[in-house]
Image (cartoon, grey):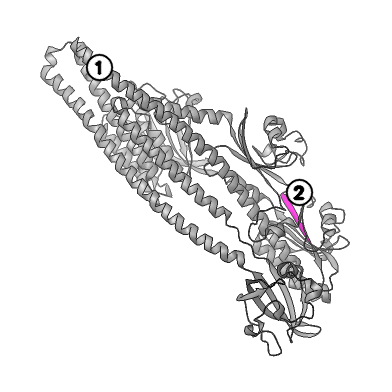
């Protein structure tokens, strides 16, 4: 009775402390998980938006460049066949270099193609004259022909249907810009067909830590990049007109309609995070300015949407709950100290992740732009031509600047040595001080070159306002210093965490060894005074202590895998596998197991981590084939949907695929521990190793028919 009373007095306070610690730690972890989870979705949308807007900005910059191209202006002014051939050659070189455009065309005011270069599946070609056609019936041609100077047209995302069945339709966005000759007359349009598939692929691959789907839709709710290829382009392909987000997710569509975004909200179908992408509002993405983007006449905007299904959210929440319940049962009397240290670790990790996200947000906010002004002056330094950007940059009207000396805009023009009768243009990107009409000065970069005009030699000056660039450079230096400091702090926290892991390992093992050792001593010294039930109880105590020791080792290995940096080199998985099998045979020499391993399985990876993964996979196959005659294990490689995979196959007891989702969770077991020993941590360790190598792992099995584990690297 005294022993029982003391046991209760010791257990009750420990149970109260352990229960309070588990509750508080679970509450903190749930809050941290939700905070991080929501931030991951926003970050995934922001990354995808940045990639898409950067691509669109580059296309807009390219179209503006083609509209001002020197070869085009020379052909418009002189009309010589040799100039047209030169223009076609420039378009061919442009298409081959960029590898972004299905077609690059110049179309005259009648809507007829004058010069066209086709991408031709990676072999750009200049289309001969007999194949040039009139495109006057196309809406994007009519819209582009109606543009004013400085404007640019962006069509809707659509499937290209102009190839007459020569190849499968492909997603394109057509961009057009008007072209004016030296006398200011509109002579036609430059038109490029941007290959949209790379943009859609970049959006799909920008998930990062996102645990759901990222989609791109038009404003009518049709998928451009959707849940599956069968649901995309419903407005353009027959039989898919009802494939809209409104049909599948009506509540989410109701939240999105009329809302400019960005917005994150929860409905019955899960968590949604969305923003809108407007070709005429690219938020100052280099290499164009916000003002240049505002002059884009867009046929439509797009909706960028991230979705995490409700069942995924519920599963993640349940996993958090289950992990802490299992941990509380296993840690037992040491839970109070462990909970305090674990809470400290999670707080540190949350602070580190917040600092990294803040740094990334500041980097995304650094958008540089540099609009150019063009001035042409004669040998005496008198201005004979300016463009519209000169008026906006300096505050003068074009009529005010003509015939004025270039010193009006660049007071120290003589210092450049390129204006005047003895000018020999050679400057490129020289730093100067420019002067606005209101007398304010600003730093600028000027590039000079000599041009021949009807009035004689002249100097072509390209002036760029670099005020924003210099300010942005200073800000970038500050952010780099801050990021360096943040990285030092993160490295310090990781070292503290590693020291903590070793300390916990030692502190947990010491009492377990004592329990096991004294139980063994009691059996050896006093076993004859105990009945069979007493000896059985002591044996169970020893078994529990030994299993807890194994669990501690597995947990530390799991944590160590998460922190280990990859040391990638060329390795042969077959050689590693043979070494592991030899060790298994040495541990169980009485077992007869047929093992078949391919001769060579070369790949790139961390040899130490890959050995840990194979030890777990082959060890499981060895364990679960016990009792099979004959027992058989295979290790090799194959192809799954065109992707190279490695596999470990056995003819063991197998498992029900209905529970496959639990395989790679820590402490998840599909078989009774009395039949097959283990802690349920091995496959979680394998999954983390495979994920660190950028791969994935899955399993195929049936009860009684063995199991196959496949993974990629």
Q: Residue furthest left?
A: 525
> Which residue was labeled with disc 2?
156
Q: Which residues are magenta?
A: 164-177
Structural distance between the alpha carbons of marks 2 and 1: 75 Å
Up-down relation of residue 586 to residue 66 (above or below): above
Percent position (x, y) of residue 628?
A: 36, 25
Crowding near the residue tagged with mark 2, few <14, some 14–19, many ≥20 C-alpha atoms within 10 Å: some
Up-down relation of residue 5 to residue 206 (above or below): above
Percent position (x, y) of residue 174?
A: 75, 54
Which of the marked residues, 2 or 1, is nearer the chain's N terminus? Answer: 1
Q: Which mark is residue 101?
A: none
Left or right placement of residue 301 versus residue 643 in this view: right
- Residue 182 visible in the snapshot: yes
- Splitting the image into 4 quarters, where does residue 204 fall? top right
Percent position (x, y) of residue 81?
A: 82, 74
Q: Please, what secondary structure does the residue beneath circle 2 have?
A: loop
- Out of 324 and 382, give the one closest to the viewer: 382
Crowding near the residue tagged with mark 1, few <14, some 14–19, many ≥20 C-alpha atoms within 10 Å: few
Percent position (x, y) of residue 9?
A: 25, 17
Q: Residue furthest right?
A: 110
Up-down relation of residue 225 to residue 708 (above or below): below
- Out of 127 and 436, give the one closest to the viewer: 436
> Which residue was labeled with disc 1?
9
Q: Please, what secondary structure does the residue beneath circle 1 have?
A: helix
Q: How many marks?
A: 2
Was residue 182 drawn as part of the magenta stretch in this picture? no
- Residue 84 visible in the snapshot: no
Left or right placement of residue 162 versus residue 668 in this view: right
């Amino acid at each position: 009775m005294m022993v029982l009373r003391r046991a209760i007095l010791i257990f009750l306070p420990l149970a109260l402390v352990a229960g309070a610690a588990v509750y508080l730690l679970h509450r903190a972890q749930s809050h941290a998980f939700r905070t991080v989870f929501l931030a991951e979705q926003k970050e995934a949308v922001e990354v995808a938006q940045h990639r898409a807007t950067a691509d669109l900005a580059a296309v807009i910059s390219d179209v503006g460049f083609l509209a001002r191209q020197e070869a085009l202006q020379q052909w418009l002014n002189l009309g010589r066949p040799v100039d047209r051939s030169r223009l076609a050659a420039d378009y061919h070189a442009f298409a081959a270099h960029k590898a972004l455009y299905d077609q690059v065309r110049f179309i005259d005011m009648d809507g007829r193609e004058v010069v066209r270069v086709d991408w031709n599946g990676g072999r750009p070609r200049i289309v001969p004259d007999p194949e040039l056609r009139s495109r006057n019936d196309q809406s994007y041609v009519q819209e582009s022909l109606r543009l004013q100077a400085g404007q640019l047209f962006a069509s809707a995302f659509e499937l290209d249907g102009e190839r007459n069945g020569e190849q499968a339709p492909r997603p394109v966005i057509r961009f057009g810009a008007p072209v004016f000759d030296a006398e200011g007359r509109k002579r036609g349009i430059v038109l490029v067909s941007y290959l949209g598939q790379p943009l859609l692929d970049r959006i799909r691959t920008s998930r990062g830590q996102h645990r759901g789907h990222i989609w791109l839709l038009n404003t009518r709710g049709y998928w451009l990049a959707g849940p599956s290829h069968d649901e995309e382009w419903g407005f353009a392909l027959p039989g898919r007109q009802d494939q809209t987000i409104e049909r599948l997710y009506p509540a989410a569509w109701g939240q999105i309609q009329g809302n400019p975004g960005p917005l994150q909200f929860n409905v019955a179908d899960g968590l949604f995070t969305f923003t809108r992408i407007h070709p005429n509002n690219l938020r100052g993405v280099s290499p164009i300015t916000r003002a240049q983007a505002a002059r884009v006449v867009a046929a439509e905007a797009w909706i960028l949407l991230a979705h995490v299904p409700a069942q995924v959210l519920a599963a993640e929440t349940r996993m958090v709950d289950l992990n802490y319940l299992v941990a509380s049962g296993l840690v037992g009397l040491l839970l109070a100290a462990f909970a305090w240290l674990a809470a400290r670790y999670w707080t540190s990790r949350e602070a580190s992740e917040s600092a990294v996200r803040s740094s990334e947000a500041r980097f995304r906010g650094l958008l540089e732009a540099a609009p150019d002004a063009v001035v042409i002056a004669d040998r005496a330094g008198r201005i004979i031509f300016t463009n519209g950007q000169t008026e906006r940059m300096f505050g003068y009207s074009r009529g005010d600047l003509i015939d004025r000396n270039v010193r009006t805009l660049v007071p120290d023009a003589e210092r450049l040595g390129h204006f005047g009768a003895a000018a020999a243009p050679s400057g490129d990107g020289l730093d100067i001080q420019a002067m606005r009409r209101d007398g304010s000065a600003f730093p600028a970069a000027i590039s000079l070159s000599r041009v021949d005009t009807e009035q004689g030699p002249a100097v072509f000056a390209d002036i760029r306002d670099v005020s924003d660039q210099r300010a942005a450079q200073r800000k970038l230096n500050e952010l780099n210093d801050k990021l360096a400091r943040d990285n030092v702090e993160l490295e310090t926290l990781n070292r503290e965490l590693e020291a903590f892991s070793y300390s916990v390992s030692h502190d947990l093992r010491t009492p377990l060894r004592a329990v096991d050792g004294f139980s063994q001593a009691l059996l050896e010294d006093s076993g004859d005074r105990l009945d069979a039930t007493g000896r059985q109880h002591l044996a169970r105590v020893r078994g529990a202590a030994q299993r807890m020791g194994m669990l501690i080792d597995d947990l530390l290995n799991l944590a160590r895998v998460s922190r280990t940096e990859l040391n990638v080199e060329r390795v042969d998985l077959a050689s590693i596998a043979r070494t592991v099998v030899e060790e298994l045979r040495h541990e169980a020499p009485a077992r007869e197991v047929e093992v078949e391993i391919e001769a060579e399985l070369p790949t790139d990876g961390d040899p130490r981590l890959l050995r840990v993964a194979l030890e777990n996979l082959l060890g499981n196959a060895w364990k679960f084939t016990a009792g099979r005659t004959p027992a058989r294990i295979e290790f090799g490689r194959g192809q799954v949907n065109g992707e190279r995979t490695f596999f470990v196959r056995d003819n063991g007891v197998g498992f029900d695929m209905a529970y496959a989702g639990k395989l790679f969770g820590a402490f998840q077991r599909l078989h009774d521990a009395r039949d097959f020993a283990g802690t349920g941590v091995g496959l979680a360790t394998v999954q983390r190793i495979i994920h660190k190598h950028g791969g994935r792992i899955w399993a195929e099995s049936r009860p009684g028919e063995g199991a196959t584990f496949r993974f990629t690297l």
